[in-house]
Amino acid sequence: MSDLLSKLDPPQRVLMGPGPSDVPARILNALAAPTIGHLDPAYLQLMDQTRQLMRQVFQTENEMTLAISGTGSAGMEACVTNLIERGDRMIACVSGVFGGRMADVAGRYGASVDLVEVPWGEAIRPEQVEAALKAAPQTKAVGIVQAETSTGLLQPLDEIAEIVHAHDALLVVDAVTSLGGMEVPVDRLGIDACFSGTQKNLSCPPGLAPVTFSQRAVEIMDRRKSKVGSWYLDLSMIRNYWGSDRSYHHTAPINMTYALREALQIIVEEGLVARFERHQAMHRRLRAGLEALGLTYIPQHSLPNLNCVRVPDGVDDAAVRRQLLTEYGIEIGAGLGPFKGTAWRIGLMGHSCTARNVTLILAALETILRQSGSLIEPGSALAAAAQASDA
Amino acid sequence: MSDLLSKLDPPQRVLMGPGPSDVPARILNALAAPTIGHLDPAYLQLMDQTRQLMRQVFQTENEMTLAISGTGSAGMEACVTNLIERGDRMIACVSGVFGGRMADVAGRYGASVDLVEVPWGEAIRPEQVEAALKAAPQTKAVGIVQAETSTGLLQPLDEIAEIVHAHDALLVVDAVTSLGGMEVPVDRLGIDACFSGTQKNLSCPPGLAPVTFSQRAVEIMDRRKSKVGSWYLDLSMIRNYWGSDRSYHHTAPINMTYALREALQIIVEEGLVARFERHQAMHRRLRAGLEALGLTYIPQHSLPNLNCVRVPDGVDDAAVRRQLLTEYGIEIGAGLGPFKGTAWRIGLMGHSCTARNVTLILAALETILRQSGSLIEPGSALAAAAQASDA
């Protein structure tokens, strides 16, 4: 019983995994503002501001831009269940966990799912998508992950977006690990449905999923013949709460909206261009340092904000992560799926993406690898990082 | 732009609607504790403590007791989608909005739904449930709302629970507006699936949905032939995250877990018996005062913590609520569905359930009704409330 009633005292971590990232004090303070009602005029105004800020970060004018009341995966499921009716055909591009997840979700809502696959860590090739669309010309939607959290892959989207639209299909993009840390050009690419989460580059606690839908996607939703599969995620009702009707659907996570608004304000104040450059610059430093330690990157194109490297031969993956956590208070991510035990995922997301953290993780990793006698190229990480910062 | 970047400054309300209720400073502080990783050993320990505390408030030993990462309606959908397979038969008892919602959700997941209905505000009668089960003996589950938020009805459950189990069906109970404010005797009644939300009598911000499942319900889930309809709510995976496997499913709303743990601690510290008595005592005072003002209760049996009364003839519903909000900073709820414009819903939930608030709402309502010349029995509300407090 005493443990059950003990005072909350979470350890102070440096969050350098695949999310959550470190949350600024300003956002934690916003989270703790007094709760008001979900139909209070003051709250409805905060929702309006939040959706306008979301549009800026999604680089879109889309009217239907809002936050789903769940974490990033709820955003994925909202996109799928609102666009797909039983018997519809959908292509899911799979290069890691999250592309596979989209296929799983679509199947549950009755889609006939065709997979476009590559080995984990490789990018989906435009000609694969083209071939799949030619083989299934009645395909309604193509789902693809821009930032594959399981492998650190940055998936190029320009050509694929053109191909999908040339075949009159909807483009559904997973931007959970990209939004707020790099370009997610929703309008430029004509992305029809895009979803993200709050706990990655927005540096907000987890609990909301920003989503945005093109006018074309909204028209297709409006023409549905059947009810949306999920009641909780049914945008035909939720849009009336976020819109001018203000019809009650479910009670929104009010304090999380405070926090998301604050997180988006911080991004708009920093400016998207400056923010993306910061992520690129810190990534170059980190990459130079990790490679100087002899670590190699797994993905064909690395995300700036999630660095997925192979665990060196003979190094105990879990022991290193445990030492980082317990001695240094630093969290990094383990490998998933085929990379379980063989990959580390080092995040540089939002508030966690700083010169201090790059220096800290390189110094800590070098020290730990040195202690275990498994350092391949000792002493060069910080020098390489410093050199990259001059570049 | 300036509005978009304005400092967060929500008004300080007194929340006396159907939820959210006022959140104690202690819970807001917990919410704002530093975010840590969703797989951090320190977080997993907090999850364990939170589920143990949830068991106490649900009055159950159920192993499968956890918090769904969404608001109360996500809890409802989780219960339905995990128990129901396409083609299953389910009975939904409808005496207001939320019984109807359960029917809607079950239909979307492919259930063949039989309705047991009464006029809004009346209680479902045991013989109705018995008749429905006899008419559809293969019924898998019966869904019923213990605390109907739309009408303030307290639904007696004892006899209905016996009938449902005598017919070998599962009993699914909506305890969104009851948990933490009155008895929700999950084990005593053998409730098979029960869901709630955080923003009612737990006085925590909205964002999580506590749920609990009996061993029998778990066995039925284990024998499913098809995947659960919703990926996000699939307990066959989520249970491995809350259980000893700690398999990643989705990123839990970490800070909301801090807040829920704190809210449950406050309840356990107060003690369930004392807490329920406080809600009853404040309800008696409020009821005496409201009735002295000439207001009449709508439901056949009123919940202690949600008081649903008729708007007196000739009184402008919206104008009174607006005046309460803008002049007094007090939020009460409007009527829903058939009671739109004709009912007020006054909540006495958790931290909002105090002598101060009872006195305040009675005094404010009396003043407003007096000002508009529509006071039926002036001056007696506080006297009646005082008398009820002596009783």
Image (spheres, coloured by chain):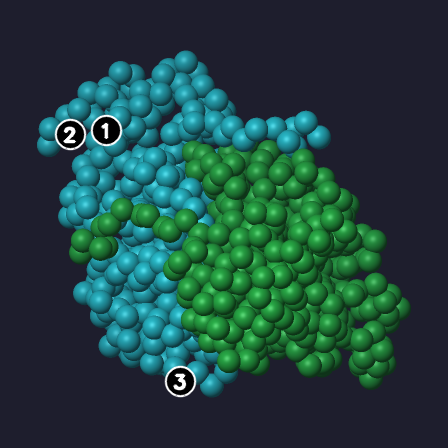
Chain colours: A green, B cyan
Foreground residue, B265 or B126?
A: B265
Q: As shown in the figure, which amino acid type bears the numbered disc 1?
A: Ala
The residue to which callout 2 is attached is: B389
Relative image position of residue A175 (x, y in whole percent): 67, 59
Which chain is disc 3 placed on? B
> Quick one: SS at disc 2?
helix
Relative image position of residue A8 (x, y in whole percent): 31, 48
Left or right, B297 with reference to A156: left
In primary-sequence order, the first of circles 1 and 2 is 1
Q: Is residue B199 above or below residue B104?
A: above
Left or right, A210 with reference to B344: right
The residue to which callout 1 is attached is: B355
Q: Residue at x 76, y 75 (%)?
A: A124
In primary-sequence order, the first of circles 3 and 2 is 3
Relative image position of residue A348 (x, y in whole percent): 60, 55
Which chain is disc 2 placed on? B
Q: Is residue A354 above or below residue B217?
A: above
Q: Marks 3 and 2, how far apart in space?
A: 52 Å
- The answer to whether one can see residue B272 in this image is yes
Which numbered mark, 1 or 2, is in the foreground of this view?
A: 1
Give the class, few, some or many, for how many residues have Cα within 10 Å of label 3's Cα (few <14, many ≥20). few
Give the class, few, some or many, for how many residues have Cα within 10 Å of label 1's Cα (few <14, many ≥20). some
Q: How many marks?
A: 3
Q: Marks 3 and 1, how far apart in space?
A: 50 Å
Residue B223: assigned label: 3
Left or right, A47 with reference to B125: right
Q: What is the quadrant of residue A103 in the picture? A: bottom right
